[in-house]
Image: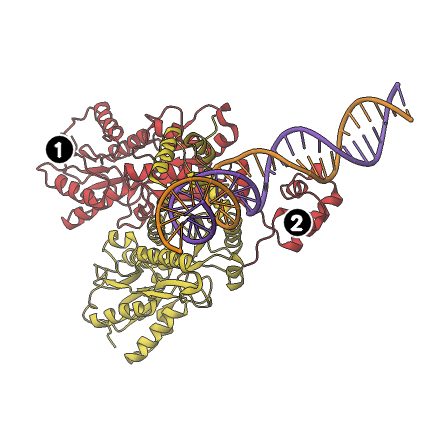
Chain colours: A red, B yellow, C orange, D purple
Amino acid sequence: MPKRPTIIDVAKLAGVSKATVARVVNGQKDIVSQETQDRVMEAVDKLGYERNSIAGSLRTDKTYMIALSIPDITNPFWPEVTRGVQDTLETSEYAVVTVNSDWDAARELKYLKMVRRNRFDGLIINPTDANNTHFHDMEVPIVLLGSGNGYAGYDSVGSDTESAVQTALNYLHSLGHRRIALIAGLSVRRKNTNRYHTYVDFLARHHLRLDPDLVIHGDFSLQAGRDAMRQLLSLPHPPTAVFAANDIIAIGAMQTAASMNWRIPEDISIIGMDDIYMASTALPPLTTIAKPKYEIGVEAARLLLARLEMGDEIPIQSVRLPCELVVRGSTAPPAEGTDRA
Amino acid sequence: MPKRPTIIDVAKLAGVSKATVARVVNGQKDIVSQETQDRVMEAVDKLGYERNSIAGSLRTDKTYMIALSIPDITNPFWPEVTRGVQDTLETSEYAVVTVNSDWDAARELKYLKMVRRNRFDGLIINPTDANNTHFHDMEVPIVLLGSGNGYAGYDSVGSDTESAVQTALNYLHSLGHRRIALIAGLSVRRKNTNRYHTYVDFLARHHLRLDPDLVIHGDFSLQAGRDAMRQLLSLPHPPTAVFAANDIIAIGAMQTAASMNWRIPEDISIIGMDDIYMASTALPPLTTIAKPKYEIGVEAARLLLARLEMGDEIPIQSVRLPCELVVRGSTAPPAEGTDRA
DNA sequence: GCGCTCAATGAGAACGTTCTCATTGAGCAA
DNA sequence: TTGCTCAATGAGAACGTTCTCATTGAGCGC
């Protein structure tokens, strides 16, 4: 295999120094005469010269590579976030290495090391276990996906979950539902307090009693949704509506309702959260609170680009993007005769 | 920001040459005395030395980075393939940059250039428009996802689509279906001939007449599935079963059937292909031919690793992974009284 | 004519690692 | 004692680009 032409080969052919070749190739057109530029570009074309970004990176300490650490690319929530990150960084000529933490602290730490070793320029991460010390040791800009709580000093972007939960509960309430169950999910990092507290506040604000039987904690899986729904519909006094912490749980809940011959939405209304692809293809299509997944990715990438460019000159930002109620076919007013008190 | 310790700093502290430090750090334990090794590692720990892989890459011309070019990470087929690639390459310490071609030739070409510029070690690609000349110019190992047809000289891995189509059609036939429609999809690169030809052969082998009204070509979208099903169910003589070219089309078809009050599977059976996540969460759950998505990714990465290690010493491979019929709730024998001839 | 300024360009060091060939010292055999 | 072999280690070049400071020549003003 013949060696690829270098900047030195171009310089020789064009009869200039390698510094001048670099100036032309990197677009410093204002300080190189037109005649010299032409000579250089002719040599570049003739030799088929292509810049070697590894060598450039060694010299400049900039790789134009970013790592994106998410829990799992096969989880239906994350591909769109990933796509938002990729599309946005691509416009600034950054390449994105995507890694899967699998909600595992050791894996996550392994990837942080990879970022250091490869001299990546930055990191966008939905953290599992990493803390501020880990991040400080990275010595590159970091943007957090999700809540920035507990991570002072870092930009973050997530959705406005609290008002999203309120929107969902308010919508069910406006349909006439009074016995509303919460399938809360569990966060790996902490109890999922936001959804639960918002639910409690909602009940208090509407003078509704908190019935502990109507709150189920489980993980964010289809099976957890199935199990929770079976539990709820087996109560002596079942709910008329269910708010699930994400669409996957909601779809599991729908499956159990159907298998127990509860009609959706006639007998039981269900709302999810996320609006992953299959919310719209479920039967009936799932009413859900749509998280702006792609936009979260875009915003995270924009925050990172700003940080890369301006460093400490701009304040730390924590962006909350609004969610949107998407009414489909899984919600309706409660059936006549069901308890509305 | 203090400069990170280099191999020269370690060498000075340990009182050895930088070559010896490199030997120790890179595991060449057999040619360095234990006493020297201890001294070096002590200095490494004391200084917190971390290898700079950019510098190593410049010297060795190996980056341990791979590009994976797929059509779109948000298409439900591709995250699992991606995951298979990532998991497999990760065990050999390769990082994976994932890019989205969007079935666009110019984008794809842009990414090929990125691979060259960044001196990536290899490429795994589901090609849109790239041809053998493009690939030859890459000067790195390449593995194709999907059919290797038209790409002599490159390893490829895909699923055995032909026998998968046969399996689907045979299964419908064994249930008693004789009027079986094909929603064929269109390939961006060429007419989707495999599925169609296999369908035609199947009909001939079973002495069934080819009815052109029962073959619909559209793209691989939900909407195409909806439209095709509306067309089929509006025929004076509708089919009793539908084989759709992928799950997304199949789910679109299911939605139309439901909206036209055709029961699935009692009135119309549907089979898809791919077994994406939402095939199992549809209602009724979709019977489908499962493509081994994750395994395709794993195999592609294995082929690439083999090629990276052995170069031309091993023959070009074209791997066909078997698909699997997954019977769920969208198929049943045709209702009594429907035409079976 | 001389001195100054400025644009254009060049020389060489830097970035941090790996590799190759040379050196050194110990051990062994003649 | 001398010469040879081999293991352990070191010196310096290489990889390809970018940056910094020096150089050169042209133009201008006094």
Q: Please state, as top left, top right, bottom left or bottom right, where the N terminus of chain A lies in the image.
A: bottom right
Mark 2 → mark 1, Cα distance in angstroms: 76 Å
Give the residue at the far bottom of this rendering.
B207
Would you place residue A283 above or below residue A169 in this image? below
- Chain bearing tag 2 is A
**Tag 1 secondary structure:** helix
Disc 2 target residue: A10
Give residue A213's mark: 1
Same chain under badges 2 and 1? The reply is: yes
Would you place residue B301 above or below residue A295 in this image? below
Q: Residue at x 33, y 39 (%)?
A: B34
- Between label 2 and label 1, give the one nearer the viewer: 2
Q: Position of residue B68 (x, y in %)?
A: 42, 52
Question: Is there any visible trace of residue A248 in the rendered image?
Answer: yes
In this view of the protein, which residue sits in the foreground, A179 or A6?
A6
Q: Please state, as top left, top right, bottom left or bottom right, where the C terminus of chain A lies in the image.
A: top left
Question: Is there any visible trace of residue A118 in the rendered image?
Answer: no
At label 1, which amino acid type do we have?
Asp
